[in-house]
Image: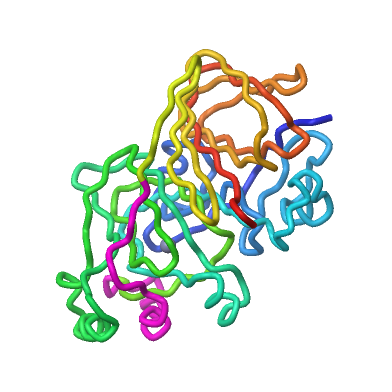
Amino acid sequence: MAEPLFLQSQMHEKIWGGNRLKKEFGYDIPSETTGEYWAISAHPNGVSLVKNGLYKGFLLDKLYAEHRELFGQSKSPVFPLLTKILDANDWLSVQVHPDDQYALEHEGELGKTECWYVISAEEGAEIIYGHNAQSKAELRDLIEAEDWEQLLTRIPVKAGDFFYVPSGTMHAIGKGIMILETQQSSDTTYRVYDFDRMDDQGQKRELHIEASIDVLNIGAPANSSPASLALEGIKTTLLVSSPFFAVYKWEIDGSVKMQQTVPYLLVSVLDGSGSITVDEASYPLKKGDHFILPSDVKAWEFTGNLTMIASHPNGH
Ligand code: ZN
C-alpha cells in the first residue's frame, strides 16, 4: 500500500540553542539549549525513524539501503538530503562548509550546500551572508587581524525570507531566528569565528582557520530569486533549484490534487492543519509534522490550511 512515511527524529543540544522547538512546535526537547531538530535525516549523527505503516520502525538509512524502489532507484549511495529546524537563541558560529570534492577528500562525506527558509525572526535579527575580502590574501589578513566588522557582511532578516548558501559561503544564523534548513546530508563545518564563547566546561569550541581559508569563495554569494504561481487551492513558490536540490513553499487553502513528478519528496509542515489523502486513506497533518512521499505515492490530495516546505534532490 502506498503511503506517506511520517518521521520521528532527533534533537541536538547546542551552545546557541533555546526552547522554541518546544514552545513553537510542541516537540519534546532535552534542555533549554536545544538548537536543532534533524527532522528528515539519514545522516549517521541523527537518523529519523518511520512512525507509521508497513515500514514502521525502520530507520531512514536502512530503509534507503534496502528499499531503494521507494526512492526511484536513486544511484546516490547515501540518502542525499537533510532537513532541519533550527532555533538560534544566540548567534551560531561564523562558518563555511566544503564542496563535495573537498569534503570527500578530507572528511569522507558529502560537502554541504544548504539553504534557509526563515520561519520567524525577532525585531532587528540579522544573519552573516558572505564577506568583503577581494582576494584570498585579504581574506587571510582580515581573519588573522580578527577584523570581523570589516570582513563580515550582515543582512537583516524577517519571517518568509529565503537564502541559498552554496558550499564556500561565509555564513552565520543570528540570534532570535528560527529557520527550516534544507541541506546536503553532511555534518562538516569549518568554524572561522565563534564570538570567543566558552561552553559550560569553560572551553572554546575549535576553530578551523586553514580549512576555512581553503574553501571560502571570493565574491558575494548569489541568492536565488523565488518565483510564485497561484492555482486553485495552492500557491507554489519555487525557492531555489540548484544542482543539489529544489525547494518549494506550498501554501494550501482549501484542497488540491497533486501528482508525483520526481522520484520522491521531503515535506515539512510549518503552519496550519489539514490532511493528506493517498489511495483513499487520509492522514492528519499539523504544524511540526515531517514526511516523505516515496515513489509509490503517485498522487495525493491536500486539504486544509497548510504552509509547507517541500524538497527533492537534483541530479544525484
Ligand atoms: Zn552552515
Q: Is residue 71 left or right of residue 252?
A: right
Q: Is residue 245 above or below residue 169?
A: above
* Residue 206 spot, x, y in % from top left: 41, 79
Q: How is the image coloured?
A: rainbow
Of residues 101 and 15, which is closer to you in this image? 101
Name the residue: 56% across, 43% down.
311
Q: Quadrant of ligand 1?
A: bottom left
Foreground residue, 132 or 60? Answer: 132
Q: Quadrant of the C terminus?
A: bottom right
At 39% from the left and 35% from the top, the residue drawn is 227
Q: Position of residue 46 (x, y in %)?
A: 62, 58
The secondary structure that most of the magenta stretch takes on is loop
Q: Quadrant of residue 20?
A: top left
**Residue 215 position by quadrant:** bottom left
Residue 285: x percent and y percent? 59, 26
Q: Residue at x 81, y 41 (%)?
A: 55
Depicted 233 relative to depicted 161: above or below: above
Image height of 143 relative to 32, above or below: below
Residue 220 among those drawn in magenta: yes
Magenta part of the protein: which range? 195-224
User: Residue visible at 22% across and 75% down?
Assistant: 133
Q: Is residue 69 left or right of residue 19?
A: right
Considering only vertical position in the picture, is 242 above or below 25?
A: below
In the rendered image, the quadrant that contains the N terminus is: top right
Q: Is residue 278 magenta?
A: no
Q: Outermost residue, left direction?
A: 150
Residue 51 percent coordinates (x, y):
72, 39
Count of residue discs: 0
